[in-house]
Image (cartoon, rainbow, N blue to C red):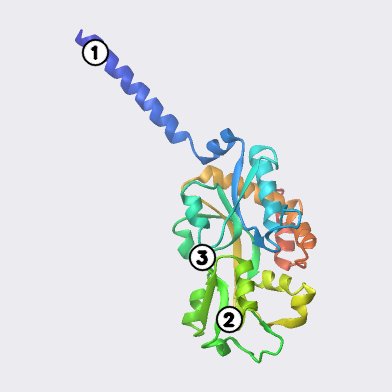
Amino acid sequence: MRANLLAKLSLTTVLSGLALCMAAQADQLDDVKARGKLIVGIKNDYVPFGFLTKEDELKGFEIDLAKYVAGKIVGSETEIELVPVVASNRIELLNAGRIDLILATLGVNKERAKVIDFTEEYYNMAGIVLLTPKESTIAKWEDVRGQKLCGMQGNLYNRTLTGTYGAQTVLLTGTADMFKAFQNGRCSAVAFDGPILQQKLSDPEWGAKYKIALDTFDYIPIAGGVRKNEPRFLEEVNKAILSAEAAGLLVKAEETYDMGSSEYVTKRAADAKAAGH
């Protein structure tokens, strides 16, 4: 009787151990492949990185990359769910498990690295530039002291603008609201990511009225973001990014979305191709 009880207990222990082992081995990469769909947080109002066309299609530099990554991980570029995010909620959504991956102009810094893991870097962004009316006399960043500047919640440089340069920031949650606030006179200038403001000036109406008064005081590397402690998933995402670069996907995306040809993207493509990715 006692022997039978011990045998049952031993079997239960073994089965429990196997279950725990299997649970420990299951990770995000397994979950994504089992689901058959990659869920990616993207921007849908950031021309040229992610935006809605007049036909309500999502297009952009990071949209192209997201679809390529999905193709490599789940086998089809169409097996993807694109979830619009903003700077203030993208990391929260990632760590809550609502999305698998951030590809949304995510700047690399030490504070973010404490709560997420970064992928391979794939772009080098002019961290912030200043867009003003053409008649503006602002000539250096120190001139923004006391000025109201429209910007975006969650931008890395908001603290620098207020703390170092003494500006007053009017922070919005989306670029459409930011540009509207500027046009409605809530601020005297827009302090925001260089590529987005340069792209805005390609609109003849904006180009006729406004200018980039100040170039960036810093460049920031852009990468994807994944949850911490998911090494297999991170490795697969990195492989896909490097493969995309080697295939010239991002070089072509710069051309497609009128971003100009950056030395950074071109060099990474050449390096990835030479390395056989």
Q: Is 169 drawn above or below residue 121 in the view shown?
A: below
Residue 105 image offset from top left, x and y in percent? 61, 62
SS at mark 2? loop
Q: Quadrant of the N terminus?
A: top left
Q: Is 204 drawn above or below residue 83 in the view shown?
A: below
Residue 241 seen in the current view: yes
Q: Is 169 drawn above or below residue 240 in the view shown?
A: below
Asked if labels 2 and 3 touch by Cβ distance under 8 angstroms, the answer is: no
Judge from the rendering whether residue 187 lies leftward or rightward of residue 267; answer left or right.
left
Residue 219 image offset from top left, x and y in percent? 61, 72
Residue 51 image offset from top left, x and y in percent? 69, 59
Give the label on residue 145, or none: none
Residue extending farthest to the bottom is 137
Residue 198 image offset from top left, x and y in percent? 71, 73
Mark 3 Cα shell of 10 Å, populated few (<14), some (14-19), many (≥20) = few
Q: Nearer the viewer, mark 1 or mark 2?
A: 2
Judge from the rendering whether residue 272 lies leftward or rightward of residue 36; answer left or right.
right
Tell me the residue that label 1 is attached to. 5
- Work out how far the residue at label 3 is from the one at label 2, CA to CA, in angstroms: 28 Å
Comparing 21 with 186, the one in front is 186
Tell me the residue that label 3 is attached to. 109
Q: Earlier in the sequence, mark 1 or mark 3?
A: 1
Give the residue displayed 79% in from the left and 60% down from the top: 256
Q: Amino acid at mark 2?
A: Cys
Q: Earlier in the sequence, mark 1 or mark 2?
A: 1
Residue 129 seen in the current view: no
Mark 2 Cα shell of 10 Å, populated few (<14), some (14-19), many (≥20) = many
Q: Amino acid at mark 3?
A: Asn
Tell me the residue that label 2 is attached to. 187
